[in-house]
Image (cartoon, grey):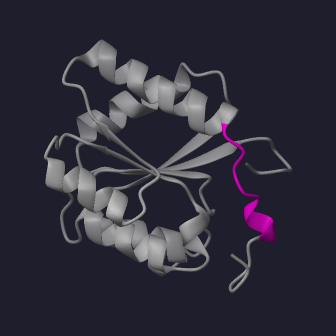
Amino acid sequence: MNAETGWIDILLVEDNPGDVRLTQEALLEGKLKNRLYVAKDGVEAIEFLRREGNFQDAVTPDLILLDLNLPRKDGRQVLQEIKADPVLRVIPVVVLTTSEAEEDILKSYDLHANCYITKPVDLDRFLKIVQMIENFWLSVVKLPNHDEVKPGRC
């Protein structure tokens, strides 16, 4: 959470424009002030998180919603890079994907995902799931203050 503004910053890593739109709608209906940033593939997500290329002014998100099936660099690779980085690994990563495959679930947790949620096909259920994520991760859970997270201090 940005201490100055009270806003929660969320990075959604999702290549499906429909799911992006639904997530935006669900978060708009939520109770918390949030800013949603979208990376459309894994390469863009890593650039955003490392403030590279077009993302030099990017914020450090409080939460990452990560799809597994992404172009250029899949979500498993993104998750592995995030959790291997001493600065980024403190950011909670919620895998939000269509895959129900046991191997994807096990691999995600093996790579230290903070939670794994299968996207429901039903529109109303999808909206409820996103709102439940928001409620739990952004109002119940105590998140780290990114201003105090420095390289080598995790």
On the image, the x and y values in percent for residue 34 come to 63, 38
Q: Is residue 143 magenta?
A: yes
Vertical relation: 122 (above or below) 6: above
Q: Residue furthest right?
A: 4
Q: Nearer the viewer, residue 150 or 13?
A: 150
Q: Which residues lie in the magenta part?
A: 141-148
Q: Is residue 36 magenta?
A: no
Any part of residue 58 in sight: no
Any part of residue 53 in sight: yes
Q: Residue furthest bottom?
A: 152
Residue at (55, 32) in percent of width and height: 134
Answer with left or right where residue 142 lies relative to residue 56: right
Residue at (25, 61) in percent of width and height: 107
Residue at (29, 51) in percent of width and height: 67
On the image, the x and y values in percent for residue 105 come to 25, 50
Residue at (58, 31) in percent of width and height: 136
Q: Nearer the viewer, residue 41 or 86?
A: 86
Vertical relation: 35 (above or below) 30: below
The chief SS type of the magenta part is loop
Answer with left or right where residue 131 lies relative to residue 79: right
Image quadrant holding the C terminus, namely bottom right
Answer with left or right where residue 54 lies relative to residue 41: right
Q: Nearer the viewer, residue 63 or 153?
A: 153
**How many discs appear?**
0
Quadrant location of residue 99?
A: top left
Vertical relation: 42 (above or below) 127: below
